[in-house]
Image (cartoon, grey):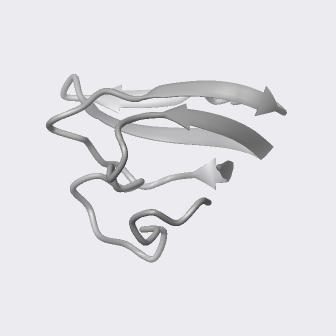
Amino acid sequence: MKIQGEFVWHSHADTDEVFIVVDGAMTMTIHFRDGVEHRPSADAECKLLLVEPAGTLNTGDVQSTLTAEDGVWV
């Protein structure tokens, strides 16, 4: 996936995920609140490999314009 700027606050109640930076830098890193709710961000475009179970929505428990369809690579 690619990120630039701040993503939405969200959580994945039933799973963990791993972010691996492939290109660029997550210069602002991943922000956490309440332990599991998180918001990845990057000052400039950053390409990431996300490791998580199939079917995990990219915005977790939050619906937004950034929510990708299940099974679609972003």
Q: Quadrant of residue 11?
A: top left
Q: Nearer the viewer, residue 34 or 59?
A: 59
Q: Quadrant of residue 29?
A: top right
Identify the residue at the far bottom of this view: 65
Residue 27 visible in this rendered orientation of the protein: no
The image shows residue 31 at horizontal and vertical percentages of: 44, 30
Q: Residue at x 31, y 27 (%)?
A: 16
Q: Quadrant of the C terminus?
A: bottom right
Compared to residue 15, the image places residue 45 above or below, namely below
The image shows residue 23 at horizontal and vertical percentages of: 84, 33
Compared to residue 36, the image places residue 70 above or below, namely below
Q: How many numbered discs sit on the rendered protein?
A: 0
Q: Nearer the viewer, residue 66 or 6?
A: 66
Compared to residue 40, the image places residue 71 above or below, namely below
Q: Nearer the viewer, residue 13 or 56?
A: 56
Q: Residue at x 15, y 38 (%)?
A: 13
Compared to residue 65, the image places residue 34 above or below, namely above
Q: Residue at x 22, y 22 (%)?
A: 35
The image shows residue 68 at horizontal and vertical percentages of: 46, 68
Q: Quadrant of residue 20?
A: top right
Residue 56 visible in this rendered orientation of the protein: yes
